[in-house]
Amino acid sequence: MQTLQAARSSPNAGDAAGALLRDLIDYAGLFPPASLAMMPSVANYDGYLRSEWNWILGRFIVPVARLGEFEETFAGLPAPAPGTQLTKWRLSALLSADPIADVARIREFNARMTSSSSCRKAHVESVEVKVSGPGEVTRLSGIMPAELTTYFEVPLASCGECIAAVAGRGRRAKLRTGGETADKFPAPETVIEFMRLCAAANVPFKATAGLHHPLRSIHRLTYQSDSPSGMMHGFLNVFLAAAFLRAGMERALAISLVESRGPFEFSSGGIHWRKNRLGTDEIAAARKDFAVSFGSCSFTEPIDDLRALHLL
């Protein structure tokens, strides 16, 4: 049995930590608090794709309005070394206030990328949009084509009706787990209620913001030297809680898990927390079709923390 302080040498398919971490982090370097320009964001993602941790890397997040800027920067990446195997870039695009024009723009972008003679390819496979209520979910679902996986960021104060609408349209939900100020971080009870509703309705979800660190802990909320600090949710806590909820964990215990500092024990066959256990197959299934990923403006920060915990 391995604790958080025990080493994991490689992303083995039968390894519980590997099942939990694979494709977990969508890179959102364009967004706060990093707020990088397009060129360093694209260069970073290119480097991460070629790193030993590329199996943890998910999609590149970009606003639809900046797809043209992305395309120009993407085309300007240095030519790969001869014989280099390149992975198609998976993009998730944030919609603007004009979703009909956005869909047209995405389709044109994907068509150009498909027909391009370049050795590098990119493809918008999902979109993300913030909504104010179930009516918007219904309206926008009628606009989004089936080939675009759609994540609706719903208001947490009244997410029940929105998640029901998302389920009715066969779409996905999005949970905002933090921001640049302390009030942007939802309470553990709120996080669990969102995930519990998603599990009950068979709605896959992703999370975004405030999940730079594996374990719940206090950190600066931005990268500014005078930034205030606050309690931040841990991505291990959140995604383990999601998998346990899907397996039937009761609400109160799941809240305790989100609040926990561990220890989480990883082995080749599963993960233990207190007297609760999830098998590797259960974790992999939860990640595949329920708790999909989270967006982070940093990829290196979560990786460095995982390495410090000897999970990598």
Image: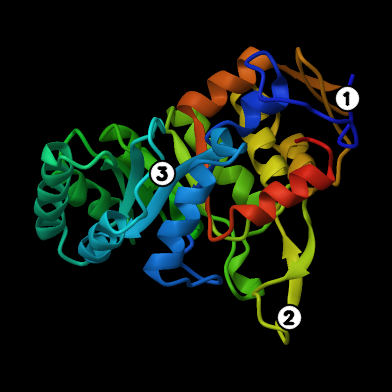
| Sequence-first disc among 2 and 3 | 3
Tell me if mark 3 has few (under 14), some (14-19) or many (20+) residues whose alpha carbon lies within 10 angstroms of its own.
Answer: many
**Where 129 falls versus 284 (above or below)?**
below
For the image, the number of numbered tags is 3
**Where 87 falls versus 154 (above or below)?**
above
Closer mark to the observer between disc 3 and disc 1: 1
Q: Can you identify the residue that label 2 sits on?
A: 228
Q: Secondary structure at mark 1?
A: loop
Q: Is residue 221 left or right of residue 259?
A: left
The image quarter containing residue 251 is: top right
Q: Measuring 31% from the left and 37% from the top, which residue is drawn there?
A: 171
Task: Name the residue type under label 1.
Answer: Gln
Q: Is residue 78 left or right of residue 249?
A: left
Q: CA distance from mark 2 to mark 3?
A: 30 Å
Q: CA distance from mark 2 to mark 1?
A: 35 Å
Q: Residue furthest bottom?
A: 226
